[in-house]
Image (tube, rainbow, N blue to C red):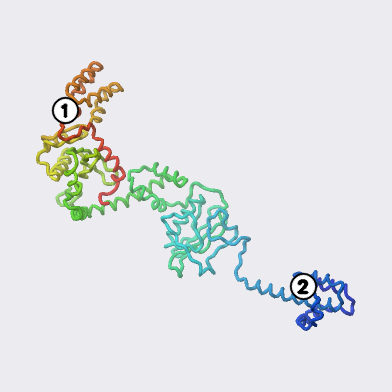
């Protein structure tokens, strides 16, 4: 600015006579007294320009005194402008070394340029956002708050997985955590304890990743994988190592060693076993609460002792809610489907179910039991309790459908001697078709099963014998009263041939079968 004024002064000196030239010091000394200029002279002075150059060159037709006063006024104005600009520059207390101002979001595609350094200092009035783990936010911001260093590391691992860049822990202390890029990137971030917020705060985020993406990250720890896939393993404890490895590859687009996956499953199952062990101590409390909150319910927990002096161990549990029992007796058909299925969780055993059929021919659960194994003793225990709950004294008007389970046929004859016992036609056909396969044999079987009169049934059996006499002989082994409509009782108002309702119920509760007994 001052150099410009000196050049302007030299140009004016060359145009003016020597006796009227003023030095730069005299110009500066006369500048403050410009307000004493006579009004007659000041009236013809042109407007002031920013650079002052035009005001010096436009005075060719004016007198030397007017030019001299005009020069004094211009130089004085430039001096004041220069001083004001210097004061404004000194008032700026904060500046950034990079060309672009730093952004609060550290994971944007533009990111921070190399060498840029973002700190939280000077931002006390700024509202700090809090990290939300359930949202699994893939962006980390300067001044973001975390519960502790462990949560910050977990968040940074999630960020690294999202960006497919590996990082290492340069400092891993209780009060401070610092991470840098494994590659040659200038990336670095630091989080430490904040006395102001009493939690961990992301203080520094330097640079951005410029290295290539990686699909095998060392920073993805076993603990991080356990926290992320704990629920999935808990829902399916029988998941294989290869299956979980594929899930990680599909969801995270990462390759994880099979040994690490194996350790993850083992550690999660240890936690599951601990939770399963704790729930057995509360089974009696759970049974008491079910009885208290559901009037008329029956919940029985049976235990046994492995040794005489040993502790009681869970063996069986029977549940029949009062509301289900009353509504079944009030508005459903007297048909009960019996079936069993395996439990898929840590609690090994089987689930025995009794499913009814309502007025809309839809399934209606009545009672269920968790037993150690499906055999004659477990079925007898279950059906005896069911018979008592439903208050079945006269079994003549009842129909029980089964899949020919082991020990169940004899128990039904023992506890329900006068009831109608049906066998699922699909299971009969599955066993019969092992020797007699083909579409022709299948059609003949279902034609025989759907016959509504005894004469029609005998006629269709004769037709089957003409096609394959051995097939007819093998089918006659099964009692037609248990699988043909022509021999079903009519008082129950139900002519079902299969036990699909029980099968559908077992399929509906597939996910629930892997969960613990106590919800």
Residue depicted at x 53% and y 63%: 204
Mark 1 surroundings: few (<14), some (14-19) or many (≥20) residues within 10 A:
some
Residue 154 seen in the current view: yes
- In this rendering, would 480 be left or right of 209? left
- Horizontal placement of 55 versus 427: left or right? right
Q: Nearer the viewer, residue 472 or 322?
A: 322
Q: Position of residue 41 (x, y in %)?
A: 82, 79
Helix, strand or loop under label 1? helix
Mark on residue 143?
A: none
Residue labelled with disc 2: 47
Left or right of residue 403, residue 415 in this image: left
Q: Is residue 189 above or below residue 52?
A: above
Give me the residue at 16% from left, 28% from top.
487
Q: Quadrant of residue 367?
A: top left
- Cα separation, mark 2 vs mark 1, equals 120 Å
Residue at 42% of width from left, 42% of height from top? Answer: 246
**Which of 219/499 is in front?**
499
Q: Quadrant of the N terminus?
A: bottom right
- 271 vs 470, left or right, is right
Q: Position of residue 238 (x, y in %)?
A: 33, 43
Residue 316 seen in render: no
Residue 347 % position (x, y): 26, 46
Q: Is residue 371 above or below residue 62?
A: above
Q: Are marks 2 and 1 in contact (CB under 8 Å)?
A: no
Residue 369: x %, y % from top left:
20, 44
Disc 1 target residue? 487
> Helix or strand or loop: what does disc 2 sit on?
loop
Q: Mark 2, residues whose alpha carbon is within 10 Å: few (<14), some, or many (≥20)?
A: few
N-terminal label among 2 and 1: 2
């Amino acid at each position: 600015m001052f150099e410009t004024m000196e050049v302007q002064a030299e140009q004016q000196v060359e145009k003016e006579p020597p006796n009227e030239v003023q030095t730069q010091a005299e110009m500066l000394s006369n500048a403050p007294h410009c307000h004493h200029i006579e009004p007659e002279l000041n009236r013809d002075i042109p407007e002031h320009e920013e650079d002052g150059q035009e005001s010096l060159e436009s005075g060719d037709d004016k007198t030397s005194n007017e030019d001299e006063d005009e020069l004094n006024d211009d130089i004085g104005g430039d001096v004041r402008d220069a001083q004001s600009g210097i004061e404004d520059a000194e008032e700026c207390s904060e500046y950034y070394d990079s060309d672009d101002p730093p952004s609060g979001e550290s994971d944007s595609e533009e990111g921070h340029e190399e060498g840029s350094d973002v700190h939280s200092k000077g931002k006390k009035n700024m509202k700090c956002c809090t990290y939300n783990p359930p949202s699994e936010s893939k962006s980390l911001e300067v001044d973001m708050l975390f519960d502790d260093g462990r949560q910050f590391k977990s968040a940074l691992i999630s960020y690294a997985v999202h960006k497919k860049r590996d990082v290492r822990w340069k400092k891993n202390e209780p009060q401070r955590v610092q991470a840098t890029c494994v590659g040659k990137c200038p990336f670095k971030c630091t989080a430490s304890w904040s006395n102001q917020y009493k939690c961990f705060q992301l203080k520094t985020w330097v640079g951005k990743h410029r290295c290539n993406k990686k699909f095998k990250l060392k920073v993805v720890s076993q603990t991080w994988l356990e926290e992320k896939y704990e629920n999935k393993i808990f829902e399916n404890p029988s998941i294989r190592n290869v299956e979980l490895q594929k899930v990680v590859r599909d969801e995270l687009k990462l390759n994880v060693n099979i040994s690490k996956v194996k350790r993850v499953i083992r550690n999660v199952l240890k936690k599951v076993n601990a939770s399963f062990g704790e729930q057995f101590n509360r089974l009696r409390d759970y049974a008491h609460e079910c009885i208290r909150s559901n009037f008329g319910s029956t919940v029985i927990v049976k235990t046994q002792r492995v040794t005489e002096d040993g502790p009681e161990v869970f063996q069986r549990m029977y549940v029949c809610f009062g509301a289900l029992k009353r509504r079944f007796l009030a508005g459903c058909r007297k048909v009960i489907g019996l079936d069993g299925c395996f439990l898929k969780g840590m609690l090994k055993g089987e689930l025995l179910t009794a499913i009814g059929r309502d007025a809309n021919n839809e399934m209606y659960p009545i009672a269920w039991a968790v037993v150690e194994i499906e055999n004659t003793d477990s079925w007898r225990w279950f059906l005896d309790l069911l018979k008592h709950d439903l208050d079945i004294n006269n079994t003549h008007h009842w129909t029980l459908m089964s899949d020919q389970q082991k020990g169940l046929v004899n128990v039904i004859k023992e506890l329900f001697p006068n009831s109608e016992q049906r066998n699922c036609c699909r299971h009969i056909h599955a066993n019969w078709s092992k020797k007699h396969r083909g579409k022709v044999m299948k059609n003949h079987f279902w034609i025989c099963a759907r016959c509504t009169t005894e004469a029609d049934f005998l006629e269709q059996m004769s037709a089957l014998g003409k096609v394959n006499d051995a097939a007819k002989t093998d089918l006659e082994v099964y009692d037609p009263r248990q699988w043909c409509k022509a021999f079903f009782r009519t008082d129950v108002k139900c002519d079902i041939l299969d036990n699909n309702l029980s099968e559908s119920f077992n399929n509906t509760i597939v996910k629930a079968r892997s969960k613990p007994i106590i919800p």
